[in-house]
Image (cartoon, rainbow, N blue to C red):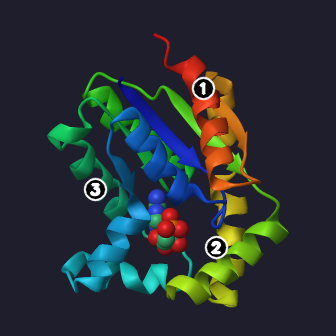
């Protein structure tokens, strides 16, 4: 089944985990800008060196860099039949950039899922993840910054997609399997065509 989907949600909402599961479920690649940046930082690439000053502070990487890596990734053959985007777009300019990429390929988004979780719950989850995974940007300071960046720049995107009639809100509270089931049920009506 072809599915072109964006997964939105505050840091710590379980977006990354769900994005991988949903990609597997529908047989399309999951494209996570955060994962791509982390892999480049770890690998010491030129891109990694350019982005680490932003990611380490919880700030958004400049659009021109981010848009380019997404355009390159979506141009790969395995993404031709669909994708799950995790962590992109994150501001209105990236919404436009994604629209242009898809229009150039004569396609469009099917659905945008917004996973919502209470901010006290996400903060708690992220602090726990920091201990388990040792992610460098999971310090209390960057967690606060990333939540603020999400609220200011990313959350308003939901309205754009509501207006297009493709937003599917999903409650992110609960067991991982339960949330996956909720997500699949929420996106299916958008994939009928
Ligand atoms: P994430 O794993 O999605 O929380 O992303 C980790 C970090 O990568 C973010 O805090 C940003 O610094 C950067 N990043 C990921 N996606 C984007 C994006 N779409 N635009 C700008 N920066 C991004």
> How many neighbours does mark 1 have within 10 angstroms: few (below 14), some (14-19), or many (20 or more)?
some
Q: Are marks 2 and 1 in contact (CB under 8 Å)?
A: no
Q: Are marks 3 and 2 in contact (CB under 8 Å)?
A: no
Residue 66 appears left or right of 141: left
Q: CA distance from mark 2 to mark 1?
A: 25 Å
The image position of residue 76, as x and y in percent, is 17, 44
Residue 77 position (above or below residue 16) = above
Q: Is residue 157 visible?
A: no
Please give the residue where the numbered disc 1 appears in the rendered image.
Answer: 166
User: Could you say which quadrant of the image residue 168 lies in?
Assistant: top right
Q: Residue at x 59, y 18 (%)?
A: 189
Look at the numbered disc 2 and give the secondary structure of its residue.
helix
Please give the residue where the numbered disc 3 appears in the rendered image.
Answer: 68
Task: Point out the tag, 2 or 1, that comes first from the N-terminus.
Answer: 2
Please give the residue where the numbered disc 2 appears in the rendered image.
Answer: 146
The image position of residue 82, as x and y in percent, is 33, 33
Task: Point out the tag, 3 or 2, that comes first from the N-terminus.
Answer: 3
């Amino acid at each position: 089944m072809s599915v072109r989907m964006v997964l939105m949600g505050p840091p710590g909402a379980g977006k990354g985990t769900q994005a991988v599961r949903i990609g597997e479920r529908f047989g399309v690649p999951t494209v996570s800008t955060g994962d791509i940046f982390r892999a480049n930082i770890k690998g010491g690439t030129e891109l990694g060196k350019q982005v680490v000053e932003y990611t380490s502070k919880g700030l958004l990487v400049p659009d021109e860099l981010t848009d380019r890596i997404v355009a390159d990734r979506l141009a790969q053959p395995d993404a031709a039949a669909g994708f799950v985007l995790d962590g992109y777009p994150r501001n209105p300019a990236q919404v436009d950039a994604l629209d242009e990429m898809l229009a150039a390929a004569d396609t469009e988004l099917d659905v945008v899922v917004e996973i919502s979780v209470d901010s006290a719950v996400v903060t708690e989850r992220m602090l726990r993840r920091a201990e388990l995974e040792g992610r460098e940007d999971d310090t209390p300071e960057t967690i606060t910054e990333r939540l603020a960046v999400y609220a200011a720049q990313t959350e308003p995107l939901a309205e754009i997609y509501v207006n297009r009639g493709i937003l599917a809100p999903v409650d992110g509270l609960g067991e991982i399997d339960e949330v996956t089931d909720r997500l699949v049920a929420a996106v299916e009506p958008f994939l009928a065509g």
